Amino acid sequence: MNRQMDSANISDMNNQLAVSGWSTDTELVRKFDRPINIVDAVCSTVDEAIQQWSELSETPPLYQFVNVENLDGLFKTKATDSSGWLPSAEFQFQSCRVTLLYSSSIRVIIERDP
């Protein structure tokens, strides 16, 4: 498995957001510094996955699977414990699993079947 370190600038209407992460043939991980709008983080990562894995563009878009406007309300005060990361939210998008991890930064992980 070839791991590739990535960094990108994600534009929203008012800001340029520095994003770091990595990708493999089956996984795309993006780390966003807080504060970040969760909808922007998820949508930009899913858009990047669609560009990286062209088969994802062959079916309906994310908003037809998930009410993305409600993602901002998913988080509780403490989303991790002493044993490590716990998913703050997890959902399916097409053949991929999308996981959001919430801590001092927000990680969006998209995993697809090989």
Image: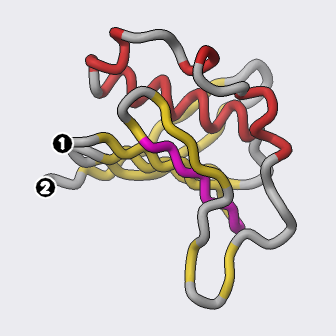
The region drawn magenta spans 97-104
Per the image, the residue denoted by label 1 is: 114
Vertically, is 83 above or below 24?
below
Q: Is residue 77 above or below residue 32?
A: below
Percent across and percent down for residue 72 are: 81, 41
Report the quarter where the N terminus lies: bottom left
Other residues around mark 2 within 10 Å, as few (<14) / some (14–19) / many (≥20): few
- Amino acid type shown at disc 2: Met
Residue 66's place in the image compared with 111, above or below, is above
Expressed as whole percent of the image width and height from the top left, the position of residue 10 reads 58, 30
Q: Main secondary structure of the magenta part?
A: strand
Quadrant location, the C terminus: top left
For label 1, the SS is loop
Q: Residue at x 68, y 61 (%)?
A: 102
Task: Characterize the local packing of mark 1: few (<14), some (14-19) or many (20 or more) Cα atoms within 10 angstroms.
Answer: few
Q: For the residue marked with disc 1, what is the amino acid? A: Pro
The residue singled out by tag 2 in the image is: 1
Could you say where residue 33 lies in the image, as x and y percent from the top left? 67, 54
